Amino acid sequence: MDERPQITFCSGVGTVTGANFLLESPTSSKILVDCGMVQGERVALDENREPFPYEPASIRALIVTHAHLDHVGRIPKLVREGFKGAIYSTPETKSLAELVLNDAAGIIASEAKQDGKPPLYGSDDVQRVFPLWKTVPYHERLDVTGDISIFLKDAGHILGSAMVEVSVPASMPISTKILFTGDLGNSPAPLLRDTEAVGNVDYLVMESTYGDRNHEPKEERLKEFERIIKETLGRGGTLVIPTFAIDRTQVLLYELNNLVEQGRIPKVPVFIDSPMAIKATEIYRSSEALFNDQVREQIKRGDDIFKFPRLEYTMSREESQDIEKMKGAKIILAGSGMSMGGRVISHEARFLPDPKSTILLVGYQAAGSLGRELADGAKRIHANHENIKVKAKIETLYGYSAHKDGDHLVEFVRTAGDRLKETFVVMGEPGASMHLAQRLNDELGKKAIVPERRRPYPLLS
């Protein structure tokens, strides 16, 4: 092996999903940053069945940036195939990952049954993961092998999300420092603290989901949300919002709480129709120390930010089905965020043919997903085993994305110290990654490239 540390981008290049990066030290210690699912029109694509391009038993540690499926979804497969090292993350990421992986195991089993294939992994495999999992608070340096240490910084993306600063060798006064961003929050966010600065690192591995575009201004997103609600309810329609269970649901709940309590929207039934989102909301509720100052002050004044009149949490399938029988205006938040499964599919099948209703897309819609079809203006879609005409109004509101947009990704890199040698732009569709890399080169004079998948990149010390 080369006498320098090196990174191999095993997946998570050329796509926004499937984060899985291998770092090898000069003494051949190997760690992974994230081990996520490659996603598209299905939760478990065939690509996820491919062998890992490394021997799982050779990996000393896995560092998890946050609990979204595209960053944790293949961990049970990794453990089943021989990984016996330690898994590290913030405490909140571990708690949320248990929800995400157990939910994924159920969906994977259902998909496998439909396809007549063995599942990618099962609930037993998920249970084998967590005895290996250790938690690390923000801002505490930890040696994870003899020559690699980590330091977690707040990414501001979802609860517990972290940027991982890796030092190689760990014990030397001068070491190579690499910052893996995971996903970067759309700061300032309604609930969470701002993303921390890059700092003085040698290399940056950063996401680029929205590297080629900007969100609507933050001061407009709440106005637009209010407008869409009022227009839909004014027609007597149903507002269906496909939501990610983690963070997006909690952010929208917070915004709805404020709109209702301030009398800015009518008090109509609001349903949180996702067992995982309901459980995730309880984890958020118990983690207010990670909220921003404004929200913590609001809670201190006695406001339960996740509770307001006519809000209902529907855990059971029967309760979910009863929502569609209810006449009159209402708001439904249901998973999944890209309409790739979950209870939202049934609600979309019911309300897409209704011209009074609205489907509001509030996050990134991956290529191949039903959400992407709707965002691209499809007039007819296939859902719930039906061909459905799209007569409902389709609205998009990406200002609530939990990801930084192009301008803010550039501003983030401006916070890097002078020793930054190179930025690897990953976790984006090819056009978005290339566009961001070009901007970093042209506007900041910072060397940036889109790495090739599975090619090792030696790092200069």
Image (spheres, helix red, strand yellow):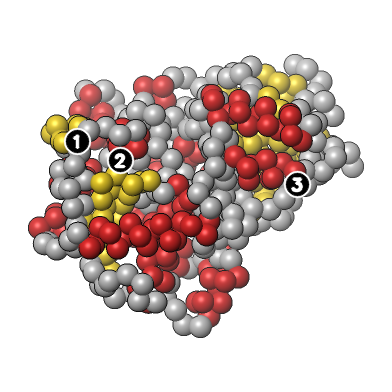
At a point 44% along the width and 61% down the height, the residue shown is: 222
Q: Amino acid at mark 1?
A: Ala
Residue 143's quadrant in the figure?
Answer: top right
Tell me the quadrant of the picture where the C terminus can be found: top right
Residues under numbered marks 2 and 3 in contact, where contact means CB atoms less than 8 Å apart = no
Quadrant in the picture for residue 447: top right
Residue 415 image label: 3
Residue 454 vs residue 213, the one in the foreground: 213
Say if 414 sits above or below 239 in the image: above
Instruction: Give residue 52's position: percent from left, percent from top.
Output: 51, 22
Q: Tell me if label 3 and label 1 are in contact, CB under 8 Å.
A: no
Disc 3 residue type (three-letter): Thr
**Residue 325 % position (x, y):** 10, 58
Residue at coordinates 19% horizontally, 59% vertically from top-left? 235
Q: Residue at x 42, y 45 (%)?
A: 363
Bin the neighbour count of mark 1 within 10 Å (Cα to Cα): few under 14, some 14-19, many 20 and up.
some
Picture quadrant where residue 379 is located: top left
Q: Are marks 1 and 2 in contact (CB under 8 Å)?
A: yes
Q: Position of residue 17 (x, y in %)?
A: 48, 33
Left-right relation of 235 to 169: left
Q: Is residue 415 above or below residue 12?
A: below
Q: Secondary structure at mark 1?
A: strand
Residue 411 lies left or right of residue 333; in this view the side is right
The CA distance from mark 1 to mark 2 is 9 Å
Question: Residue at horizontal 26%, vertical 23%?
Answer: 117
Q: Left or right: 447 with respect to 237?
A: right
Residue at image mark 2: 339
For label 1, the residue is 383
Q: From the viewer's perspective, is residue 273 above or below residue 265?
A: above
257 or 50, which is in the foreground? Answer: 257
